[in-house]
């Protein structure tokens, strides 16, 4: 990624609603309509790129290009209201207890990839290792693309389907899917599952993420738009 690259203009509520309508069309009509969806979203300011991905994924980026990293220098930091700040290399992450889960990946624009196998470290295990203050209200996430951010409540962060993922389909996560480490918030729409994860900060308040500043739901439970207000029990 060029760190001086154009990040594009933000996407407002009207465009978000258009994206939802296009996504619904893709679900209803199939792969041909999904291609139309991808082409249409790619023309929207604020989404710098969207590419068809293997297995039905669409690959989004809010910056020009994709951030680059080196396995020898990558570190995932855990800081803020913690008793033991962490700066973990990939080999150090690999020594922690590993969790495997298979979950659907649902985009708010309508497309879904079913039964995606993910592996990595439970977010709750990482917070425990860092001695996170359980009275803190929130956990913030930052991407090394320099732009994207997200937040969870402390309660959400301790769910058993919140994974700091390093592998998908039994292989290291590909660059376009957020290598080397991403969050997988399985019960929430895909925009919560921040890619290219660089930092986790335990904090006093939830701060709306990149898309939430433009009208996306902060909690983002899958199915909430269909009337569900409570997340599934996990």
Image (cartoon, rainbow, N blue to C red):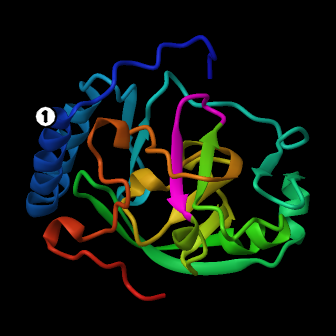
On whether residue 64 falls in the magenta region, the answer is no
Q: Where residue 102 sits: x, y (%)?
A: 51, 79
> From where the camera sits, is residue 170 visible?
no
Residue at image position (52%, 36%) is 148
Q: Where residue 83 sits: x, y (%)?
A: 87, 61
Image quadrant where one finds the N terminus: top right
The residue under label 1 is 14
Q: Where residue 115 sits: x, y (%)?
A: 43, 77
Residue at image position (82%, 36%) is 70
Q: Quadrant of residue 231?
A: bottom left
On whether residue 145 falls in the magenta region, the answer is yes
Magenta range: 144-153
> From where the camera sits, is residue 140 visible?
yes
Residue at image position (49%, 45%) is 207
**Apparent side of residue 28 relative to residue 206 in the rendered image (left or right):** left
**Apparent side of residue 91 relative to residue 63 in the rendered image (left or right):** right
- Residue 5, placed above or below residue 88: above
């Amino acid at each position: 990624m060029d760190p001086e690259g154009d990040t594009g203009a933000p996407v407002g509520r009207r465009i978000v609603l258009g994206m939802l309508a296009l996504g619904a069309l893709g679900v209803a009509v199939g792969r041909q309509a999904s291609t139309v969806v991808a082409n249409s979203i790619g023309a929207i300011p604020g989404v710098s790129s969207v590419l068809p991905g293997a297995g039905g994924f669409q690959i989004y980026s809010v910056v020009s290009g994709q951030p680059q990293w080196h396995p020898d220098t990558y570190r995932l930091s855990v800081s803020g209201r913690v008793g033991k700040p962490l700066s973990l290399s990939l080999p150090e992450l690999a020594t922690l207890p590993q969790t495997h889960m298979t979950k659907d990946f649902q985009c708010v624009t309508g497309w879904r990839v079913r039964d995606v196998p993910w592996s990595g470290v439970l977010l709750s295990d990482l917070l425990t290792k860092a001695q996170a203050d359980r009275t803190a209200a929130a956990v913030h996430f930052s991407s090394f693309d320099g732009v994207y951010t997200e937040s969870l409540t402390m309660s959400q962060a301790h769910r058993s389907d919140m994974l700091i993922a390093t592998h998908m389909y039994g292989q290291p996560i590909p660059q376009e899917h957020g290598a080397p480490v991403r969050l997988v918030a399985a019960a929430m729409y895909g925009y919560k599952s921040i890619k290219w994860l660089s930092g986790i900060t335990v904090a006093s308040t939830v701060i709306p993420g990149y898309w939430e500043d433009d009208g996306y739901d902060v909690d983002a439970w899958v199915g909430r738009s269909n009337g569900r207000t409570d997340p599934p029990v996990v």
